Amino acid sequence: MSENGSDSFGHNESSATSSIDTGKQRIRWHELPPVRPLTLPTLAQVLNTIKIAVAVLLSLITRRPWTLGLPTMLMVEPTTACQLKCPHCPTGRGDLSRPDGRMPLENFRALYDSLNPAPIRLQLWNQGEPLVHPEIHGIIRHATTAGSRVVLSTNVEALANQRTAEAIVRSGLHTLILSLDGASAESHVKYRVGGKWDRVERGVRNVAEAKAGLGLKYPVLQWQFLLFKHNLHERDEAMKLAKEWGADEIVFKTVQLESFEREDGEQWLPDDERLRRYVLKDNKWVLKRVERPFCARIYGSAVVLWDGTVVPCCFDKDGDFVLGNAIENGFTDVWKSSEYRMFRQRILTEERPEMCSNCTEGLHKLYAVKKGL
Ligand code: SF4
């Protein structure tokens, strides 16, 4: 069922291991006492959320961007490295145009300690697989202790290592998203190219067993199933497996395309129009949504890339809209900077960049459906 010792994926960056040598002492993450995540926001976080709501309202009414408070949701990219080669992912395809790297734990701490209050929700992923970051357990612990609900999305491969799974469960993570797109080896590897079905089964079972062994309610184990043409028939089987392996819930999510060409979409998208977020228009795939939705996201959330670069949202995969650097300039200064204000103004009243045409803001048809198990 489980295996001990470090993993080997045969890629450049070392996989997340159960311990790291800090130069002073070796931390054995899988043996540290479990941290319990906060489930209710603090008063300061509630007040900050009200400020964000006011900023959104004022911006909507005045057509001028208002900046109040700090993000209630932050996405931080731990690393751009990954073991897999998923075809719709810039990292998987190897065509991310910015440099690869990973955020050192000390930089993450500096970033987080500058946020007062801490975001209610921290999402630890972007491009790359977070669990190949050797200090990911320390990152989660730091953010949880600061009062954030930490959510991490993984391709599950690294959790086949029992110690990694145990360290993740002890870290204080609130939700672990398990990206598994099928209920068979054949379906899974069609998109998760390079993945191993037996490893992901072992990975899910490892975290479920570690949770049960420690008597912990968290992390919530959420199986995320992307709806492709080739795996639709396995939805019922995936629900059965998710329950059998120990997941808590399953989310069926529509696929995001990287190319809007007719043939690319036809290769991957379900024929059933209700199970995709795009429609075909003039031989191109376009999102089913209102023409120009108000973008509330940029008033209450932000993305910090591995090197500290702040970008407005996760749709800016290549870091085309740099708003500052959270490590060099301090996040709060970047958040209130004229660059950020100009970007918000552009999104509010001017012509929007290309990335906005693939954004889920304003999507009024099926996007994701959650089911309990
Ligand atoms: S892609 Fe554009 S509309 Fe969507 S969240 Fe980013 S800035 Fe807002």
Image: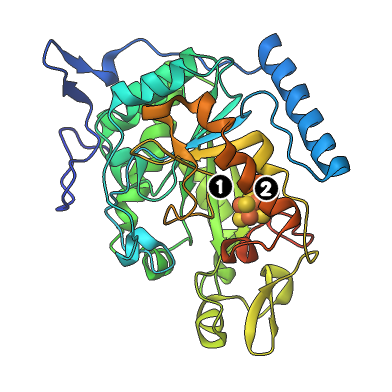
Bin the neighbour count of mark 2 within 10 Å (Cα to Cα): few under 14, some 14-19, many 20 and up.
Answer: few
- Mark 1: few, some, or many residues within 10 Å (few <14, many ≥20)? many
373 sits to left or right of 131: right
Q: Position of residue 318 (x, y in %)?
A: 42, 56
**Which circle's residue, 1 or 2, is located before the other in the chain?**
1
Visible residue check, residue 167: no
Q: Is residue 265 visible?
A: yes
Percent position (x, y) of residue 46? Answer: 73, 17
Cα distance, mark 1 to mark 2?
23 Å
Query: Residue 313: which disc?
Result: 1
* Residue 166 percent across, percent down from the top left: 33, 26
Q: Quadrant of residue 85?
A: bottom left
Colour logic: rainbow
Residue at 74% x, 16% y: name it: 47
Q: Nearer the viewer, residue 275 or 357?
A: 357
Name the residue that disc number 2 marks. 370
Instruction: State yes or no: Cβ of the residue under disc 1 lies below 8 Å from any atom of ligand 1.
Output: yes
Q: Which quarter of the figure has residue 163?
A: top left
The spot of residue 270 in percent (x, y) is 61, 76
Left or right of residue 110: residue 238 = right
- Where disc 2 sits, the SS reads strand
Instruction: Say whether residue 361 is left or right of residue 101.
Output: right
The amino acid pointed to by label 2 is: Lys
